[in-house]
Amino acid sequence: QVQLVESGGGLVQPGGSLRLSCAASGIINRIYAMGWYRQAPGKQRELVATITSGGITNYRDSVKGRFTISRDNAKNTVYLQMNSLNFEDTAVYYCNAGPIIAVYTPVYWGQGTQVTVSA
């Protein structure tokens, strides 16, 4: 059974930083991409960033230059370094993993971790 467990969320002031971690346990296909989605109150879930097993990254425009996704394949762990946070980044952040079939197609999901940006 595959489990994804996120950590690192919390409350931060505008302009601050947080680092999210996601540890995958169980048998997970090592060629899977991993990524982060987020969902803000009253909004649809949106893709934030992805990283392939080979380290190729992709970001939504609003986080480019501020967020960095990375992964440690030996530890089955993916990270999201978030800098220069603003109010619009407030959301529940979900870690996921899955194949890229034309587009990233998550198969496994974590429970989510809350990120709140507030003065």
Image: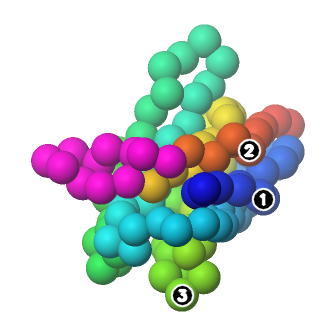
Q: Nearer the viewer, mark 1 or mark 3?
A: 3
Q: CA distance from mark 2 to mark 3?
A: 23 Å
Instruction: Name the residue at 44% across, 33% down.
Output: 46
- Check disc 3: other Cα within 10 Å, few if <14, some if 14-19, many if 20+: few
Quadrant of the rendered structure where residue 109 is? top right
Position of 53 with respect to 77 (left or right) is left
Position of 105 with respect to 47 (left or right) is left
The answer to whether residue 65 shows anywhere in this view is no
Circle nearer the N terminus (1, 3): 1
The reply to whether the C-beta atoms of the residues labelled 2 and 3 are less than 8 Å apart is no
Residue 3 location (% of width, % of height): 64, 55
Q: Residue 67, labelled with which disc?
A: none
Instruction: Name the residue at 49% across, 20% down.
Output: 44
Amino acid at pointer 3: Ala
Q: Residue 8, labelled with which disc?
A: 1
Residue 50 location (% of width, % of height): 39, 57
Circle nearer the N terminus (2, 3): 3
Closer-to-camera residue (51/18): 51
Q: Residue 113, labelled with which disc?
A: 2
Residue 42 location (% of width, % of height): 60, 12
Task: Judge whether residue 100 is colored magenta.
Answer: yes
Specify the quadrant that holds the C terminus: top right
Eyeballing the image, is 114 above or below 71? Answer: above
Q: CA distance from mark 2 to mark 1?
A: 7 Å
Circle nearer the N terminus (2, 1): 1
Closer-to-camera residue (76/50): 76
Q: Which residue is mark 3?
A: 74
Quadrant of the rendered structure where residue 100 is? bottom left
Eyeballing the image, is 52 above or below 38? Answer: below
Query: Which secondary structure lies at badge 3?
Result: helix
